[in-house]
Image (cartoon, rainbow, N blue to C red):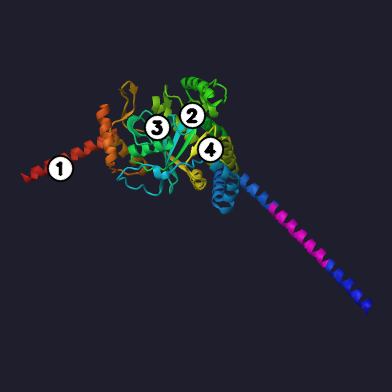
C-alpha cells in the first residue's frame, strides 16, 4: 500500500510539473505574440504615419495632445511633474479676483468669451509686481466655442483714467496703470476705461520673453535695413537688462531671430513696420504691430509642438522663475491652464489691431499722448470688434471719462471712414423721407 501511494504521488508531481511547464510555455507564447503584435502595430503605424501629409501629421499630434491633457491619466502625469512648481513659481496666489473693478451697469459678457490681459515689462527682481511701466498692454479675446482668438494692443501712451490701489484717481498714460497698481491696477484701468470684465492676466519681462521665444525655436520674419540697425541697437540695452547675449544681425531681408533678437525687434518704434498684409505702421503703432506679429508666430509654434515639447518648454520656463528673478507670472490656475491647452492647439488668430481706432497725438503739459478721438465711440468699436456687438452703448462711467478727456485734450470725436459714410447715407435717407412726407402732407 505504501509503495502504491508513493507511486501515485510521483505521478501526480510529474503531471503538475508538466502542467506548469505547459502554462509557462503558453504564457511565453502569449507574451511573444503580444510583443510581435505590438511590434507589427508599431510598424504599421510607422508606415501609415510616414505616408501622411504634413497637415495630417499635425492634426494627429494635435488630437493626441488634446486627449492626453484632458484625460485623468494624462493630467495626473503632467500634474506630478509640473503642478507644484507652477503654483510655487508662476501662479500669483495673492491675486484676488474679487478686488477687480467692473463698471456699474456693465452687461455681462457672453460666457463663450474669455478675456486675458497680457503685460510686457522691462523690470527685474522686486520690481516685477509694480513700480515699473508696462511697455506692452494686450487684451487677448478667446472665443471658447469657435477657438478664434483676437488681440488688441492698447497703445501705452493712450490717455486714460488711472486709479492706484488706494482709489486715488488721475489721468495719464496707460503704461502708468501697472506702475501705480501692479497687475490689479492695470486690469482695473482696462475695465474702467474700456467697459471690459477682465479677471485674469499674465505678465512677462524681457528675460521671460527671450526664454519663451528660444524654447519655441525663434521666429522668421522679413526686416528692412533700418530695422536691422534698430535691432542691433536695442540688443545692446537688452543684454544689459537681462544678462543674456546673442550676436548682432549682419543682414536684412528674410531673417531668423532668436529670443534676444526678437525681443529687440519688439521694441522698435522709430521706423515703419510693413505688415505681411501690406499695411504700414509708424511709431508706437508699428511697435505694437510687431509685438502682435511675434505673438502670432509663437502661438503658431505652440500649436505645432508635441505634448513632450510643451511640457519641456513649460518646465524650463518654470525652473528659470525664482523669487529673486521672476520672468513670468499669471493669475491663471494650473487647471485653468490645462483647460486652455485644447484651445491653444486648435485656435485660429482671426484678427489683431490697436486701440484706439481713431486717435490724435497731441503734446500736453510737455508730454506726447495718444488720445482717443471720442473714447465712448472707440469703446463701441472695440466691443463690435471683440464681441460682434454693433449696437453697444457705453456705460455712464465711460461716457464721463470720454467727456473729460475730450475737454482736457481738445480732441473731438472722429469716426472711422466707413462709419462716417454710413452716417451720411442714413442722414440722406432720413432727409429724403422727411421731404417726401412733407410733399405728401401738402
Q: Residue 433 carries which label?
A: 1
Q: Where is residue 186, by image quadrant?
A: top left
Q: Which of marks 2 and 4 is in front?
A: 2
Q: Mark 2 points at which residue?
A: 123
Residue 273 located left or right of residue 88: left
Between the C-alphas of marks 3 and 4, the distance is 35 Å
The residue depicted at 48 percent of the width and 32 percent of the height is 128
Task: Tell me the distance, in whole angstroms, between the alpha carbons under discs 3 and 1.
Answer: 54 Å
Instruction: Return the disc, 2 or 3, that comes first in the chain's sequence.
Output: 2
Query: Which residue is denoted by mark 3 in the rendering?
Result: 180
Pick the residue in front: 295 or 398.
Answer: 398
Dot label at residue 301: 4
Of the two numbered discs 3 and 4 on the same chain, state the one appearing first in sequence: 3
Q: Which type of secondary structure does the marked residue at label 1 adopt?
A: helix
- The quarter of the image holding the C terminus is top left
Residue 212 located within the stretch drawn in magenta: no
Q: Give the range drawn in magenta.
A: 18-38
Amino acid at each position: 500500500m505504501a509503495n502504491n501511494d508513493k507511486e501515485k504521488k510521483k505521478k501526480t508531481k510529474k503531471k503538475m510539473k508538466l502542467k506548469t511547464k505547459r502554462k509557462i510555455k503558453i504564457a511565453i507564447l502569449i507574451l511573444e505574440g503580444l510583443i510581435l503584435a505590438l511590434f507589427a502595430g508599431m510598424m504599421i503605424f510607422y508606415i501609415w504615419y510616414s505616408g501622411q501629409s504634413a497637415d495630417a501629421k499635425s492634426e494627429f499630434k494635435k488630437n493626441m495632445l488634446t486627449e492626453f491633457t484632458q484625460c485623468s491619466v494624462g493630467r495626473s502625469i503632467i500634474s506630478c511633474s509640473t503642478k507644484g512648481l507652477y503654483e510655487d513659481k508662476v501662479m500669483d496666489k495673492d491675486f484676488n479676483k474679487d478686488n477687480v473693478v467692473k463698471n456699474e451697469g456693465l452687461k455681462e459678457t457672453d460666457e463663450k468669451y474669455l478675456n486675458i490681459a497680457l503685460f510686457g515689462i522691462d523690470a527685474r527682481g522686486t520690481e516685477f509686481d509694480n513700480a515699473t511701466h508696462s511697455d506692452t498692454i494686450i487684451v487677448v479675446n478667446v472665443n471658447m466655442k469657435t477657438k478664434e482668438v483676437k488681440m488688441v494692443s492698447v497703445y501705452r501712451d493712450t490717455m486714460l483714467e488711472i486709479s492706484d490701489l488706494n482709489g486715488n484717481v488721475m489721468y495719464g498714460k496707460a503704461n502708468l496703470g501697472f506702475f501705480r497698481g501692479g497687475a490689479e491696477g492695470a486690469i482695473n484701468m482696462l475695465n474702467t476705461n474700456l467697459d471690459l470684465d477682465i479677471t485674469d492676466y499674465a505678465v512677462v519681462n524681457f528675460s521671460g520673453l527671450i526664454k519663451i521665444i528660444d524654447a519655441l525655436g525663434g521666429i522668421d520674419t522679413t526686416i528692412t535695413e533700418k530695422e536691422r540697425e534698430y535691432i542691433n541697437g536695442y540688443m545692446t540695452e537688452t543684454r544689459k537688462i537681462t544678462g543674456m547675449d546673442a550676436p548682432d544681425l549682419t543682414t536684412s531681408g528674410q531673417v531668423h531671430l532668436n529670443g534676444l533678437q526678437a525681443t529687440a525687434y519688439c521694441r522698435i518704434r522709430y521706423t515703419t513696420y510693413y505688415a505681411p498684409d501690406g499695411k504700414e505702421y509708424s511709431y508706437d503703432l508699428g511697435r505694437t504691430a510687431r509685438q502682435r506679429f511675434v505673438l502670432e508666430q509663437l502661438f503658431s509654434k505652440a500649436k505645432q509642438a508635441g505634448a513632450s515639447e510643451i511640457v519641456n518648454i513649460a518646465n524650463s520656463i518654470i525652473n528659470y522663475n525664482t523669487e529673486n528673478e521672476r520672468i513670468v507670472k499669471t493669475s491663471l490656475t494650473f487647471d485653468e491652464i490645462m483647460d486652455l491647452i485644447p484651445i491653444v492647439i486648435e485656435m485660429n488668430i482671426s484678427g489683431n489691431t490697436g486701440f484706439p481706432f481713431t486717435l490724435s497725438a497731441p503734446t500736453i503739459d510737455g508730454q506726447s499722448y495718444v488720445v482717443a478721438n471720442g473714447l465712448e465711440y472707440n469703446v463701441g468699436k472695440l466691443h463690435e470688434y471683440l464681441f460682434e456687438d454693433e449696437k453697444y452703448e457705453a456705460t455712464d462711467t465711460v461716457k464721463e471719462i470720454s467727456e473729460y478727456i475730450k475737454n482736457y485734450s481738445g480732441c473731438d470725436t472722429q469716426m472711422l471712414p466707413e462709419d462716417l459714410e454710413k452716417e451720411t447715407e442714413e442722414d440722406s435717407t432720413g432727409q429724403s423721407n422727411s421731404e417726401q412726407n412733407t410733399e405728401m402732407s401738402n
